Amino acid sequence: MFENLSDRFEKAFQRIRGEATISEANIGETTKEIRRALVDADVNYSVAKRFANRVKEQALGQEVLTAIKPGQLLVKITQKELADFMGSSHSELNIKGKPAVILMSGLQGSGKTTHSAKLALHLRTKMGKRPLLVACDVYRPAAIDQLEVMAKRVGADVFTQREQKDPVEIAQAAMRHARSHGNDVVIVDTAGRLAVDEEMMDEIARIKAAVTPSETLFVVDAMTGQDAVRTAQAFHDRIAFDGVILTKMDGDTRGGAALSIREETGKPVKFIGTGEKPEALEAFHPDRMAQRILGMGDVVTLVEKAQEQFDQESAKKLQKKIRKNNFDFEDFLEQVQQVKKMGNVKDLLAMVPGMGKALRDVDIDDDAFKHIEAIIHSMTPDERKNPDVLNGSRKGRIAKGSGTSVQEVNQLIKQFGEMKKMMKTMSGGGRRGMSGMMSRTGMPGGMRAPR
């Protein structure tokens, strides 16, 4: 995400890092490079020019203190302007009504149905809501089936009327169903088209009038760049949406849509889709995104992801086991699975300041843990709790069952033993011990994948 843009900004800042002061000449060359970087990221030229001019005005209007170099000051100014450019602060969902209604809009293929389900999971697990997903796409083959499958995956209720062909009638029936079944949020998944057309706009306008949503969201594929911004504007002109969900932000996107939509439509990006898993939906924080773009990491989001997976009670129990030297493979497997839930390993490490650039050309397999899990799953419950019983014949059986070699099993057991000793001596233990191990090697508990 934004790798090319980050590189271009870094080159722009290098132009002024050797300077003693900020002048009209050197800041002009630097902001010209910033403008080119934004245009290359598929930001509209006039928007990029306005941004570069704002950075230039801010830089020329400030005195450089002796403790701050011109390059550092420019990074600080650019970070603030980027955050303001994308919306300044996080925009919360407006969930009002009994039930509250969220209307999902967008073109076909933007990820609207998938992100309706992701949003339902977010509301259920993080806000304690009981969402109802409503299938109002009566045109696309298997659209209803897809929503039913996704609803089951995220543990949400779903409302369908397969024989009904009027989406307005379906939406109204879903509202009655929600009131009688205790659903406090209704998420209406509408039909998309391959392009903006009058029939599509008329239909979604009628649905909106019928259910009066408290939140209308526009779902758009971030990889479409400036086309995404133009489509967003067309939708907003007709149905006046309240916010945007940018999908496929984990793909090869240049970032133009994320940077431009707020500036062009006046409406905030509320969420970004960062992967295919139902959990891969992040609240959009402009200030944090600005830090990521400028290579500063995003520690706050990293901590929030960790807090979602590691509860205090489990951490205390684990800490006691570590202190008593009772940490076993069962505990380790649980830690691995919790780290996996946090998201893509490379993306997580990139949130650590300075790590993003260092990992740029490093290939970290998202299945880096699968061999470790296979080996542990091939152990009996007794072997997991008492690794000392693992003799030659047992290791051979485990290797065969996990599709690995005895050498790899031995390597894992040896590393586990070393890690166990280190965790015992580390101050803090428990979660702090695990996080310390992760930072040392980029793997849970300091373990390296057997392959």
Image (tube, rainbow, N blue to C red):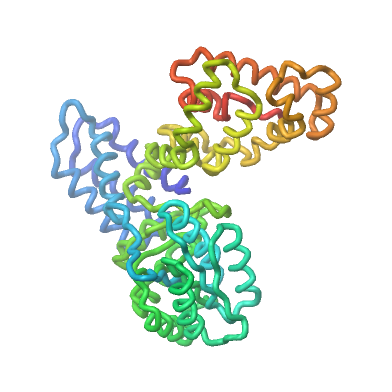
> Going 81% across and 23% down the picture, which residue do you hit?
395
The part of the image, by quadrant, that contains residue 239 is: bottom left
Left or right: residue 407 versus residue 78 is right
Image quarter (top left, top right, bottom left or bottom right) of the C terminus: top right
Say which of 353 and 372 sits in front.
372
Say which of 348 and 434 sits in front.
434
Residue 199 at what x, y percent from top left? 48, 87
Q: Does residue 45 appear in the picture of this structure?
A: no
The total number of labels drawn is 0
**412 lies above or below 93:** above
Residue 317 at what x, y percent from top left? 51, 27
The part of the image, by quadrant, that contains residue 114 is: bottom right
Residue 159 at what x, y percent from top left? 55, 73
> Going 23% across and 30% down the picture, which residue do you hit?
69
> Going 58% across and 13% down the picture, which residue do you hit?
421
> Going 39% across and 76% down the picture, which residue do you hit?
234
Residue 290 at what x, y percent from top left? 35, 46
Q: Does residue 69 appear in the picture of this structure?
A: yes
Say which of 201 and 189 sits in front.
189
Left or right: residue 353 versus residue 446 is left
